[in-house]
Image: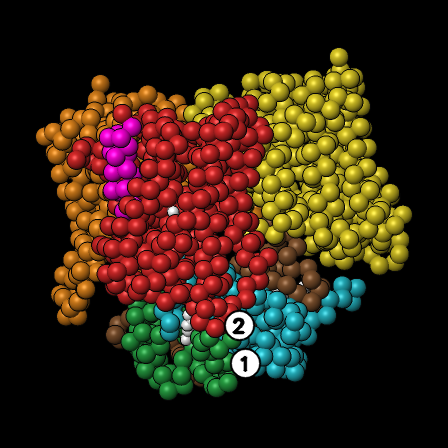
Chain colours: A green, B brown, C cyan, D yellow, E orange, F red
Amino acid sequence: MHLVKRIEIIANSFELGKILDRLDKAGVNGHIVIRNVAGKGLRGRAEDLDMTMLDNVYILAFCAPEEIKPVVENIKPLLNKFGGTCYISDVMEISSVKCVASM
Amino acid sequence: MHLVKRIEIIANSFELGKILDRLDKAGVNGHIVIRNVAGKGLRGRAEDLDMTMLDNVYILAFCAPEEIKPVVENIKPLLNKFGGTCYISDVMEISSVKCVASM
Amino acid sequence: MHLVKRIEIIANSFELGKILDRLDKAGVNGHIVIRNVAGKGLRGRAEDLDMTMLDNVYILAFCAPEEIKPVVENIKPLLNKFGGTCYISDVMEISSVKCVASM
Amino acid sequence: MDASLIVSNILNPPVLFFFLGMTAVFVKSDLEIPPPVPKLFSLYLLFAIGFKGGVELMKSGITTEVLLTLLAAVLMACAVPIYTFFILKVKLDVYDAAAIAATYGSISAVTFITASAFLTELGIAYDGYMVAALALMESPAIIVGLILVNLFTVEKGKAREFSWPEVLRDAFLNSSVFLLVGSVLIGFLTGERGGKVLEPFTQGLFYGVLTFFLLDMGLVAARRIKDLQKTGFFLISFAILIPILNAAIGLAIAKFLGMSQGDALLFSVLCASASYIAVPAAMRLTVPEANPSLYVSTALAVTFPFNIIVGIPVYLYVINLFWS
Amino acid sequence: MDASLIVSNILNPPVLFFFLGMTAVFVKSDLEIPPPVPKLFSLYLLFAIGFKGGVELMKSGITTEVLLTLLAAVLMACAVPIYTFFILKVKLDVYDAAAIAATYGSISAVTFITASAFLTELGIAYDGYMVAALALMESPAIIVGLILVNLFTVEKGKAREFSWPEVLRDAFLNSSVFLLVGSVLIGFLTGERGGKVLEPFTQGLFYGVLTFFLLDMGLVAARRIKDLQKTGFFLISFAILIPILNAAIGLAIAKFLGMSQGDALLFSVLCASASYIAVPAAMRLTVPEANPSLYVSTALAVTFPFNIIVGIPVYLYVINLFWS
Amino acid sequence: MDASLIVSNILNPPVLFFFLGMTAVFVKSDLEIPPPVPKLFSLYLLFAIGFKGGVELMKSGITTEVLLTLLAAVLMACAVPIYTFFILKVKLDVYDAAAIAATYGSISAVTFITASAFLTELGIAYDGYMVAALALMESPAIIVGLILVNLFTVEKGKAREFSWPEVLRDAFLNSSVFLLVGSVLIGFLTGERGGKVLEPFTQGLFYGVLTFFLLDMGLVAARRIKDLQKTGFFLISFAILIPILNAAIGLAIAKFLGMSQGDALLFSVLCASASYIAVPAAMRLTVPEANPSLYVSTALAVTFPFNIIVGIPVYLYVINLFWS
Ligand SMILES: Nc1ncnc2c1ncn2[C@@H]1O[C@H](COP(=O)(O)O)[C@@H](O)[C@H]1O
Ligand SMILES: Nc1ncnc2c1ncn2[C@@H]1O[C@H](COP(=O)(O)O)[C@@H](O)[C@H]1O
Ligand SMILES: Nc1ncnc2c1ncn2[C@@H]1O[C@H](COP(=O)(O)O)[C@@H](O)[C@H]1O
Ligand code: NA
Ligand code: NA
Ligand code: NA
C-alpha cells in the first residue's frame, strides 16, 4: 500500500474532452468518468440545458503525489474559464500489478 | 488551495428531495447527485423496488468546515427515520473563480 | 461520529460478482455500485468492449477499520488477475440507526 | 372447469415471456432489461392505454352507465383497504397492516393492460371508460391507508401527523396517475381524428411492448420471490385469497350494474390487483415504520403473477358462467 | 382572424402533450422522461425526417427551384444573426448579444417537425427538400455569431482568438447536423426502394414519437420558465417579436420565390425558430462570457412554445390569405 | 464478378448507416447512441428474430432436414475453433490462439440478421429454423476454446482449473443465448396466432431498428480500428481470410445437405461470422491471460464489416453460381 492523490473534478460535460486532455498532459493516465450527473452549483447554472448533451460529469483520477502540481496548473485555468470545481485528497492504493501467472 | 469538507450521502431516491432541502437549509448550496445506484445495506433493503423509482442515490457535496455541524444536525434525523448513511472527510479545494476575462 | 474506512474499487463489470462476493466474505456487508462508468487505465484496456456488458464499475464500500486487512487480502489477488484498482481512505461516519419511533 | 381458457391464456406471448423472465432468474442467466427501458415501456403503456381510452370515451359519451361504473370503482378502492386492514391486523401491526391494505386497495395497471390484451385477442369487446376507472382507483387507497394509520395509532396514544398537501400530491399527481389521466383527457379532446394519426404508435406497438415489459416483470417478480420466506405463510395465502375475494365482489357489482362481459373482467381485475409501484412509493414516505419488503413482495411476487397467469382466465370463466 | 386553425392546432395530440408536460411541472408532479429517452427520440426524429426528405429529394431531383430555396435558406441563416445582433446590442453586451443572435439565426428541428406533422394532418403537401434547408440552416449562425464577437471585441481592443478548426467541427459535424445530413444522403441514395422497407419505422412511429417527445419538451420548457425572471422584459418581448419578424421576412421570400403553401410554412418556421441545443452547446465553448441562461431560456421557454402553439397556425393563416 | 449484388447490398439503408457511423468517428463528430439504447436494440433484435423463427419452425415442423441442418451447425461450431486454433498457434501463444479461435467458432447475430434482411429485400425465401442454428452455434466454441487451453497448457505443465458449472452457465445461459432460445420456444408454442398479434412489433419495426443498430455498430467498429495497429498484419489477414474459408466450407456443407439458396447464405454467414459479445465476455473471465484487444478488434473491426459489406453479397453470388 502506498499513498496516492485522489482528484475529483465536477464540470459540465461540454468541458470533458478538454479536461481529459489536460489530465493526460499532466501525466495522469488513468481516470474514470461518470456521466449524467445532476447537480447544482453556487453559480446555479447546473441544471442548464439539462435536456441537451451539456449535463455534468464527475471525473475521478488517482495519481502519484508529485503529479499533483502539474495537474492543478493545467486544470485551474480551464475551470476558471468554463466553470467547474476540483478537489484533492489522500488515499492509499492497493498496488495491483496484473500478473495472471502468479495466481 | 484550502481545506473543505466532503459530504457523501447514500439514501433511497424517495428521500432525495428532503435531503437536498436540508442541505440547502444547512447552507450547503452546491451538490451533485448520481442516480440509479445499485446497493446493499446492513438492513438489506437496498434492492427494494428496484424496478420502480425507489433506487438509491449517491449525493456528494463539498462545504466549508464550519458548515458541517448544521449539516449533521439537519441530516441525521432524516437518515434515522428513512434509512441511509452519511460520511464526512477532508479534501483540498482548488479554488475556482469564474473569471473569463482574466484568461 | 466515528472513523470508518472508505474502499473504492474500479474494475471491469465482468468482475463485479466476484468482487462483491469477496467483500461479503471479508465482512463488509454494505456497498454501492455505479455502473456504466467510462474509464481509461494504465493498461489502456478501459474502453474495451464498450458496447457490450463489459464496461467499468465503480464500487464504494465503507467498513470498520479492522475489516480493512481481510478486504485487502481478499480483493488484491482478484484485481491482479483480472485488472482493476482499489483505494482506501479515512472518513467519519455519522452513525445512523433507523429508529422511527424516536422521531 | 374449462381448462382451455387457462391454457389459451398461458400460451399468450406476454404470459410466456413473463415465465421466461422468471426462468432467467431461477437459472441465473444474466439477462436483464437495462434501467430506463422498463420505465420507458411503462410510460408508453400508460400513454397508449390512456389515450385510446379517452378516444373511446369521446365516442361513447359520459352516460349514467359510465358514471355508475366509475362510482363503483371509487367505492371499491375505498372499501377494499378497510376490510383487508382488519383481516391483516389479526397477525400484523398497524403500520404493516395499513400499508398492505393500501397496496391491495389500489390497482396494478399492467394487470389491467394484460387483461385488456387478452380480451382483444379473444375478440371480446370492452368499453374505453374502463380506463377512467383504472385511473380513479389508483389513489384513494393511499388516503384510506393513512387515515387508518392515524386512527389506530391515536388509539394507542401516539397520534401521527402527516403533511397532507404532500400526501395528496403523492396520491393524485404521481407520475402514473398524472400521465394516465392526462392521456385520457387528451384522447377525449382530440377524439377520433387524433386517435387515427396515433394509431400505428398506440395500437401497433402495444402488444409487443406489453410482451417485452412482462419479460422484465418476470425478472423483477422472481427476484422478489426469495423475500417471501420472511413474509410467511399468512401473507402468502392472503396474497392469493384476497384477490379472489376482491374479484368475486367486483364480479357481483359488475353483474348488479349490468356491465358487459369485457367490462366485468376488467372491473374484477382492477379489484383483484394490487399496486407495487405508486402505493409502495407513497407508503415509504408516509409510513416508514412499515416494512416495504412485506407489501412489495406480496403484491409483486404473489398477487401479480397469480392474476396474470391464473386469475384473468378464471375470472373470465366465471363471467362466462354467469353472464350467458 | 380565423381562430379555427389555432384551435385545430391546439387540439393536436403533440401540442396537447406539450401542455401536459408543462402542467406536470406547474403542479409539481414527479413525471419525468428518464435521461437517454429524449436523446433517443431526438435521434429518431432527425433520422426519420432526414431519411424521408432524402427519399423525396431523390424523386423530385435537384432542380433550380430546389437550389434557389436552399440558397435563400442559407442567406437567411446568415442575415438573421446580423440584424438581431444589432437589435440586441441596444440592451446587452457584445457576448450575450452575439450568442442570442446566433441562437435565433439557427433553427429548431422539433419546431420544423411539428409544423410538418401539422401540414400532413391538414393534407397540405410540402417538398422533401425542405429538410435539406433545415440541415443547411443549422450551422451558419454559429460562424456568423463568432465573427460578430471577433469584430466587436477587436473594436474594444481585446481581440479574440478562436480555434477555428474546432469551431467548424462543432458547427458542421455536431451530432444533429451530422445525423440529419447523413440521413438525407442515405435517403437520397437508396431512393424509393429503401424508403419502402423503412416506412413502418420512419412513417408509422413518427407521429407517436413526436407526441411523446413534445411531452418531454413541455417538461423542459416549463422548468426553464423560472429563469425568465432574470431575463427581463426586453428579452421576453424579443423572443416573441423577432420570430414574428423573421417569419414575415421568410414568408415574403417564399412568396417571391413562388414556393407552395406547405413549403412556405416550413420556410417561415425555419426562419422563426431558434436553436436550443446545437448553438447553445457551441456558444458555451466558444463564447463562455455569454450567460447561457439568457440564450437558452428565451429560445426554449418563450420562442419554442410560442411557435408551436401560436406561430405555426398564424403563419399558415397568413399564407392562406396571400397565396390564394 | 457480378458487382451489382455488392452495389445493391451497399445501397441498403442498414449498410449505409453502418458507413455513416464509421464516418462519424473518422471525422470526429460527437454523434453517439446513448448507453442502454444499443443494448435495448440488440435485445429487441434477438427477441424478434427468435420469435419469428419459432413461429416458422412451428409451421414447418421438426423434420429430418431441420435436424440435419442443426447437426451440421453444431459440428461447424466445434470444428472451426479447432482448426483456427492451429492456424493461430503458428504466431500466437496458446491463450490468445484459443480465445480468438473461440471467437471465430461462435457467431455474430447481427451479421445473421443483416443477411436475413438482405434476403427479405431480394425476395429470397429462407427457413425459420435457421434461427435455431444461430442459437445452437453461439455456445459450443466457448467450451471447445477452454478445452484447447486445458490441453495445451497441461502439455506445458501448468494445468488449468476451470469452474465448469460457471463456464457452462456463461456459455449456455448468457443473456443473448437465453433470450434467443426462449423467444424461439415461445414463438414455437404460440404459433401463427401469437405471431399475428406481435407482427407490427416484430416485423414492422425490424428493419428500422436494425438500421439504427448498425449505425451504432459503425461507431463501435470504427473506434476499434486504431487497435488494429497493435494487432498486426497476421491477424488482419486472418480476420478476412478465415471468414472466406469458413463460408466456403459452410457452402459446401449446405450444397451437400441440399439447403435452399436462402438457407445456404444464412448457414455460410453463421460459419463466417465471429462473436464480439458473448465469447469475449466469457473469455475475459476464463482466459484472462489472453489479450482482449486482439480477439475483440479482429472480430469487430475487421470481420464484422467485411461480412456486412463484402461477404454477404459475395457468398450469395457464389450460391447463385452453384445452385442454379
Ligand atoms: N459545493 C459543491 N459541492 C458539490 N458539487 C458542486 C459544488 N459546487 C458546485 N458543484 C458542482 O459543480 C458544477 C459546476 O459548478 P459551478 O462552476 O459553480 O457552476 C455544478 O453544476 C455542481 O454540480
Ligand atoms: N457500509 C456501506 N458502504 C456503502 N454503502 C452502504 C453501506 N451501508 C449501506 N450502504 C448503502 O446505503 C443504503 C441505505 O442503507 P440502509 O440504511 O442500511 O438501508 C443502502 O442501500 C446501501 O446502498
Ligand atoms: N489512475 C487511475 N485513476 C482512476 N481510474 C483508474 C486509474 N487507473 C485505472 N483506472 C480505472 O480502472 C480500470 C481498470 O484499470 P486497469 O486495471 O489499469 O485496466 C480502468 O478502466 C480505469 O477506468
Ligand atoms: Na385492487
Ligand atoms: Na431561425
Ligand atoms: Na463462426
Residue pointed to by mark 1: C89
Q: Is residue E118 left or right of residue D246?
A: left
Work out whether D312 lies above or below B63. above
- Describe the element under mark 1 as helix, strand or loop: strand
- Describe the element under mark 2 as helix, strand or loop: helix
Per the picture, the main secondary structure of the magenta-coloured stretch is helix
- Residue F54 position, x and y percent, is 51, 31
Q: Nearer the viewer, residue D239 or F244?
A: F244
Residue pointed to by mark 2: C78
Asked if the stretch drawn in magenta spans residue F320, the answer is: yes
Residue at 29% of width from left, 53% of height from top?
F239
Asked if the stretch drawn in magenta spans residue B1, the answer is: no
| Quadrant where ligand 3 appears | bottom left
Which residue type does callout 1 highlight?
Answer: Ser
- Residue E121 position, x and y percent, is 37, 24
Which residue type does callout 2 highlight?
Answer: Leu
Residue range (magenta): F306-323
Q: Quadrant of residue A26?
A: bottom left
Work out whether F214 lies above or below D153. above
Residue at 80% of width from left, 28% of height from top?
D248
Mark 1 crowd level (few <14, some 14–19, many ≥20, 10 Å Cα): some
Q: Quadrant of the C terminus of chain D?
A: top right
* Residue at the front extreme, as displayed: F155
